[in-house]
Image: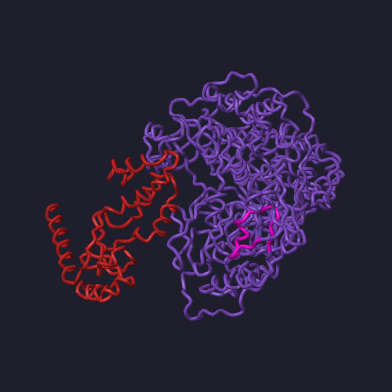
Chain colours: A red, B purple
Amino acid sequence: MNALRAQYPEEVERILAKYPAERKRSAVMPLLYLAQRAEGYIRAQDLRDIAEICEISITDVASIVGFYTLYYDQPLGRYHIQVCTDLPCALRGAEDFLRQLSEKLGIGVGETTPDGLFHLEEVKCIGACHRAPVFQVQGDGEIVFHENQTVETALAVIEALREQARAAKGEQA
Amino acid sequence: MTKLVTLTIDDQPVSVPAGTLVVDAAKQIGNDIPVFCYHPKMEPVGMCRMCLVEIGRPMVDRGTGEVLLDENGKPRIQFGPKLETACTTPVSEGMVVRTQTKVVADARREVLEFILTSHPLDCPICDKGGECPLQNLTMGFGPGQSRFLYDDKIHLAKHVPLGELIYLDRERCIQCARCVRFQDVIADDPVIGFYNRGRRLEIVTYSEPGFDSIFSGNTTDICPVGALTTADFRFGARPWELKSSASICTHCPVGCNLTFNTRREARAGGNPVIKRVMPRQNEQVNEIWICDKGRFAYHYTESPQRLTQPLVRRGDGFEEISWEEAYQLAAQKIRASQNLLTLTGGRLSNEDLFNLRELTLARNGQAVLYSDMAGGDLTASYGLAPGSNFGSMGKETAILVVASDLHEEAPVWWLRIKAAAQRGARLIVLNPRSTRLDKFATHTLRYAYGEESQALATFLPGAAVPEAYQAAVQEFHSAENAVIVYGSEGAGLAASQGLAQTAAAILAARGKVGQVNNGLLAVWQRANDQGAWDAGFRPVEDLPAALRNVEVALIAAADPAGDDPLLAQALEETGFVIVQELFMTETARRADLVLPVQAFTEREGTLTSGERRVQRFYPALPPRPQTRPDFAVAAGIGKALGLDLEGRAASLVFLRLVKTLPAYAGLTYTQLAEVTPQYPIIGRSDLYYGGTAYDNHQGLGVQLPLLPAARPVAVGQSQTAASVTAGEGEILLVPVTRLYDRGNTVLPSALLHQRLAGKTIRLHPQTAAAFGLNAGETLRLSRDGWSAEAQVELDEEVPLKMALAVRSTGIPCSALSAVRLERLTVASAD
């Protein structure tokens, strides 16, 4: 049984409907995003499922995951905190901001908090230079921008997310 | 005819067809533009930038469209501001290419410096060292020194198995994607791919088993560095130590041209051993490719289990005797007998078969081919006409493939028919189940097992055509050329006889006989079955009875007892059994006289491929002391009988053969060894271009002329599903062929063991359920005289009440037949 199709029957059909039936391989990227939504990364099983849906080889699917930096092949935390440190942002203190945020969170850049919630990344321009320090949070299928940040405001955002995750977990339990 | 375009490369004018790439145009006049990622068998990608050249084009007045001329009346040439890649740029009229200027030399040097930044430079331990395009081009064009720091080189994994056959060295990879593209475009097995980017890029496989492709070995030939190597040759030898011997693959009827690389080794007592098998270019047969069976399943020839001494039966055991004694004994038994049956297998050479035939006919014996496929007499008259070449077939040709899983039965034909279909040939695939060829077919048709001839007969002009077949039949009849390829999927002797007759009748009725790229092609089960037919050997319907009724059976290169218990029993009743063999097979075990012969690697001879191309193979190894070639053994027995048989050399036997067999009339060994220029240009001095496949200096072979048909061909009737039905507690056993079989010549290659066909039976889940069987359980098949156990595999594509059995796995299945099927419980397992 195709687990991805079982989990997201409507979404898979909606994605496939966008492409001609004999060009199913075109659906590989949106399907990868769909698969990534659940766990925050793409599992080996997802590769098999997508290969089956798109009628291409597993290796073909995997090579796309490998090529694009925004597909993850291992769990990296539920929320990706992506801080821009390009030149304009650096001039507005982004490097310092990132260093302090890293210290406060207790993880280095490219690491994940022990609770598996936050993954801190340094990225190239995200298009808000004039409002730096700026970061975006990717997670739960959304991208949220946070501009004109200080370490305090950033931590408040992070705490709110943590609270939200805890509440969601409580609901489930 | 394609339009010719004239351009100038380094002041040398050249005319090539429009659309030719600059790199290929240059190659044709001996101007080697260095490349890594470009390969003449694949579309260009321009990834490595090694082929950068200066390209100028005539200036054109935009107003008038006229070419602007300089003061000397020559066209004014405009060179681009940057260098261009010769591999992606097609030629154009008046183009001027410069490959020897300083700016080109600088570019080449810098590209190489860049490619080498993190290359490990471990040439002294690299398998490719000595035949490495990177090494050669660096010597030719590279910088003597790198400006990058040696200590900053990134180190990556060096022993990454991409499956058990092919290893990856990540450090050496230069990311040209030749391997990835070959697997995707040519082999249609996209099971290796790039993962990640930049320095972190690596080649990965996610298939199960790893690198799951029967063509995987070819990637090691076209890899321009030592990144991909075979498990077989890895760290085996240095290329310059190797001697090359031309040969022909004996695993299937394609007849791929090979080169055996040998080296003298201490472990062999100073004798040469085979280090690897490489493809040898023959653009009419295998181009520059071979399948992995051809590449890896040669180890049987040097197995320590080989027979080395003539043996005679003494009670329950064998005793060594001399050749002279053996010949005298054989002759004495044959002389004393009323009837002789000679049973031969299709791995024998034409010379072997000829002498065995002469011996047999001189004694009024029966010349029998060990095969359950018929039609060799028809392919001799209706076969592919001389000059036919899958490589030149396109949209004017219809190729009809019936009852054959070509990917398994003859991989390189699959590869070339697939390519023909991609060039526009109308491919019609007529099979009882889906195969790897369906994807490329214009029409895919199905029939029920047992009804192959009726299905094919709908292609007879004027035949009643069922709705589902109409489009395909129309397509077939509208094509200018017609090729029919038949195999033995689910078919035994009678069924394949029906197929061959029907196919021949279709071709005859359409007038598609004797013209280039038309004719009938049989996917024989063994390499030289066609040669055996040509020499007069014929399969018989009831082989057990035939064996039981003769006083002397002479069996060469066949193991009937190993395949079928009924044949083993029959052999017990044969008066005297003489076996010419490489191994102590089940048949040899039951013999009265066992004669050790030479493997094809140890002698010379010719083989006739399915396309009826006669090709020479040459000795690669010295023979073992007490072994003799089959033709010499037959001659030895013949001489002891007072017959005039030639046994001194294969070439001398061939002289007699061509005087006797009409199709071979006038052929000479010299003619078979002739070579005409082939494209693409490959070989040792052109490694960077085509890879390490060998160029052909030893002969392209000769396609035999068609013989006039003895009589008009009749439409064959095969056994129908109605004539063979499964009763209560029975199923219909369907024989199918797998590439990696369990034959005597495959088993000794341990490297392939993981991929060999298992002793399994494929059943529809409903059939399995009806017998109370689950996947993986053991069942017992039985029929009068034999029983065999096998594991259950479920496959929804198998028709109900049928079971697919792979030939050679120990389940006797020479034709579609009803057998009893029982679930094997623990209690009855003893």
Residue range (magenta): B78-97
Q: Position of residue B125 (x, y in %)?
A: 58, 73
Nearer the observer, A71 or A135: A135
The residue drawn where x is 60% and y is 44% is: B419
Q: Position of residue B144 (x, y in %)?
A: 62, 79
Front-most of residues B560 and B385: B385
Residue closer to the observer: B568 or A15: A15
Place of residue B478 in the rendered image (x, y in percent of width and height, measured from the top left) = 64, 27
Direction from residue B514 to residue B54 in the image, left or right: left
| Residue B314 visible in this rendered orientation of the protein | no
Quadrant in the picture for the N terminus of chain B:
top right
Q: Is residue B7 left or right of residue B167?
A: right
Quarter of the image that includes the C terminus of chain B: top left
In the rendered view, tell whether residue B301 sits above or below residue B770: below
Q: Position of residue A59 (x, y in %)?
A: 44, 54
| Main SS, magenta residues | loop
Q: Is residue B575 magenta?
A: no
